[in-house]
Image (cartoon, rainbow, N blue to C red):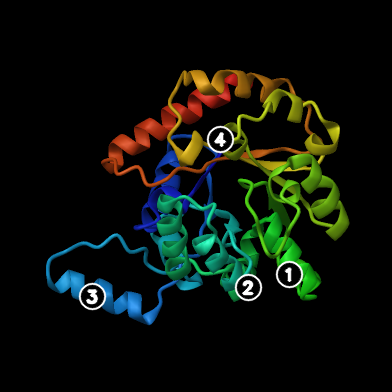
């Protein structure tokens, strides 16, 4: 089981602390890092807020130096993957903001990502994974980012810089980079048209995205074309909601996962939105959830 820094996007160091504590408690937990930016203007706004005594919800940047410093402090915290931004380039980011089909709340969300994470084409995430090569760190990319890098001829070079690349199924949307919506959201199409076509290591199966689409996960996990390329999973309720022990919406999913014979060991990551929970309570809650999930796999 892994965790992502999404649950501590405003304080990523806490994900390293959490992974350390969970490892101390006997859990094999690693980290998937979202490479947030620390633009100069954001830094100034944050500093102004601090002067006024206001803690603004602005993510700090995540650099190799930050990761090494946090790992020195929390030596049990190991990075497994870096998750690239969801959009390939700035054009795609702005497309999501202005697309008439994008809901108002989602527009604000996408606009925030422009400033806080940017686009995959900035290569910040690739550089971070490359600098952490001593930990065999790989990349998670959404299918549209894979297609974008392939079209510009940079994908092969990226593949040589990192230990592995996993393509993730996302939520369906109209993309100017990858016009086939199924190749963005459907695991079977991604297996055929993205992973096989571009010679990627495999797939990170976004179970949370599939649940949000009311997909029949039992059918997906019965499809050998998909199952044979799955190396990792994201587990969460829709909108990156928290899972709790005994969660009714996940019982059938976990049962099917337990019955599925994968070709390679699969790491599952709790990919939550910020929890805003006191730290020690979070350690206990996440630990209990991991215990429950692992118990369902026996």
- Classed neighbour count for the residue bearing mark 2: other residues with Cα under 10 Å, few (<14), some (14–19), many (≥20): some
Q: Do the residues labelled 4 and 1 touch (CB within 8 Å)?
A: no
Image location of residue 53, percent across then percent down = 12, 66
In this rendering, would 284 be left or right of 261?
left
On-image quarter of the C terminus:
top right
> Disc 4 or disc 3, which is closer to the eye?
4
On-image quarter of the N terminus:
top right
**Element carrying mark 3:** helix
The residue at which mark 4 appears reads as 212
Determine the residue positioned at 58% across, 57% down: 83
Label whose residue precedes the other's in the sequence (3 or 1): 3
Q: Quadrant of residue 66?
A: bottom left
Marks 3 and 1 sit apart, C-alpha to C-alpha, by 35 Å
Task: Please indicate, yes or no, whether residue 76 appears anywhere in the rendered image.
Answer: no
Q: In which quarter of the image is residue 111?
A: bottom left
Image location of residue 163, percent across then percent down = 72, 61
Against 101, residue 94 (above or below) is below
**Element carrying mark 4:** helix
> Disc 3 or disc 2, which is closer to the eye?
2
Q: Are marks 4 and 3 in contact (CB under 8 Å)?
A: no
Marks 4 and 3 sit apart, C-alpha to C-alpha, by 37 Å
Label whose residue precedes the other's in the sequence (4 or 1): 1
The residue at which mark 3 appears reads as 47
> Disc 4 or disc 2, which is closer to the eye?
4
Determine the residue positioned at 45% across, 60% down: 71
Image location of residue 116, percent across then percent down = 43, 67
The residue at which mark 2 appears reads as 121
Label whose residue precedes the other's in the sequence (4 or 2): 2
Q: Are marks 2 and 1 in contact (CB under 8 Å)?
A: yes
Q: Which residue lies furthest to the bottom in this view?
A: 40
């Amino acid at each position: 089981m892994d965790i992502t820094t999404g649950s501590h996007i405003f304080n990523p160091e806490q994900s390293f602390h959490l992974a350390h504590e969970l490892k101390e408690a006997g859990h094999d937990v690693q980290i998937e890092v979202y490479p947030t930016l620390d633009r100069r203007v954001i830094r100034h706004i944050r500093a102004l807020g601090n002067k006024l005594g206001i803690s603004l919800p602005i993510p700090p940047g995540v650099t190799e130096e930050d990761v090494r410093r946090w790992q020195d402090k929390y030596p049990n915290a190991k990075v497994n993957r870096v998750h690239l931004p969801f959009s390939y380039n700035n054009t795609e980011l702005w497309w999501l903001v202005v697309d008439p089909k994008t809901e108002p709340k989602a527009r604000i969300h996408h606009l925030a990502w422009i400033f806080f994470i940017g686009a995959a084409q900035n290569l910040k995430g690739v550089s971070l994974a490359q600098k952490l090569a001593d930990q065999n760190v790989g990349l998670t990319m959404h299918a549209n980012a894979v297609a974008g890098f392939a079209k510009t001829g940079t994908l092969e070079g990226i593949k040589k810089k990192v230990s592995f690349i996993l393509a993730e199924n996302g939520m369906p949307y109209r993309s100017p980079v990858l016009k086939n919506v199924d190749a963005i959201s459907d695991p079977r199409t991604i297996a055929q048209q993205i992973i096989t076509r571009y010679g990627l290591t495999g797939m990170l199966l976004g179970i949370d995205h599939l649940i949000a689409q009311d997909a029949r996960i039992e059918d997906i996990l019965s499809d050998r074309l998909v199952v044979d390329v799955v190396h990792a999973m994201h587990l969460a309720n829709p909108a990156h909601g928290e899972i709790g022990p005994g969660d009714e919406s996940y019982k059938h999913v976990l049962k099917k996962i337990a019955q599925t014979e994968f070709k390679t060991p699969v790491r599952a990551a709790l990919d939550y939105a910020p929890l805003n929970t006191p730290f020690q309570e979070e350690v206990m809650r996440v630990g209990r959830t991991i215990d429950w999930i692992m118990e369902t796999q026996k």
